[in-house]
Image (cartoon, grey):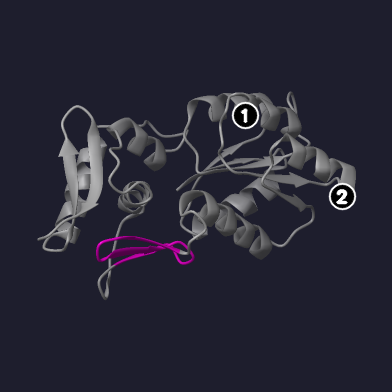
Amino acid sequence: MRVLLVEDHPPLAESVAKALKGAGLNVDVLQDGVAADLALASEDYALAILDVGLPRLDGFQVLARLRDRGKTVPVLMLTARGEVKDRVHGLNLGADDYLAKPFELSELEARVKALLRRSVLGGEQQQRCGSLVYDLGIRRFALGEQTLTLTSREQSVLEALIARPGRVMSKEQLASQVFGLDEEASPDAIEIYVHRLRKKIEGSDVRIVTFRGLGYLLEEYDA
């Protein structure tokens, strides 16, 4: 899953990004509000982490613009402002959670996982499609009793598909979950990852179906 982190203090941004990447998330890091606003308008994120005190546009302004566009991506606000009125203001604008600085990285990770669990899995810890099970807490796929060994990009593709079982996802939508802002997004490369995933779930009661010109969907079927 792809996360946007917007924090203008480089050492903090680096440590948070490292922790989130260690948890298996794809993380884009930006340092100002205008860049964040543009990214949130054009990219597909599972979660945004916004510092309040950003240059050019502050975190509240970025959040307000995001919600004005009708985007429902979960937002976790980071702030050095501990006043209740600031927290209330952020929540009223549409923030999903609020974390005051300084904070422990373990608490940030727990809050991120909780937000992703609610938004991606509807509050459930696990997502299932036939015998394929995804555990968000440990970000692990299992097929029956067997844990699947996946590359980070295979994992991102399968996470996107299992979050929308029975729904077609285009190559472009899948690519947006695989490639970061500093990478060249290649929709055609998705074919390679889908091919590899098919090999790994071959012989099970789950398959990835191709709809030419439209994309792919994950479904359960009678093998």
Residue 103 placement (x, y as % from top left): 75, 58
Q: Residues within 10 Å of mark 2 (few under 14, many from 20)?
A: few
Task: Quickly name the residue at label 1.
Answer: 66
The magenta segment: 126-142
Q: Are marks 1 and 2 in contact (CB under 8 Å)?
A: no
Asked whether residue 23 is drawn in magenta, I would say no
Q: Quadrant of residue 203?
A: bottom left
Q: Quadrant of the C terminus?
A: bottom left
Tag shown at residue 82: 2
Q: Nearer the viewer, residue 127 or 146?
A: 127
Q: Is residue 194 left or right of residue 3?
A: left
Identify which residue is drawn at 19% across, 27% down.
213
Residue 48 placement (x, y as % from top left): 59, 41
Q: Quadrant of residue 102?
A: bottom right
Q: Amino acid at mark 2?
A: Gly
Identify which residue is drawn at 71% across, 38% down.
8
Residue 68 placement (x, y as % from top left): 64, 24
Picture layout, residue 94 above or below residue 26: above
Q: Amino acid at mark 1?
A: Leu
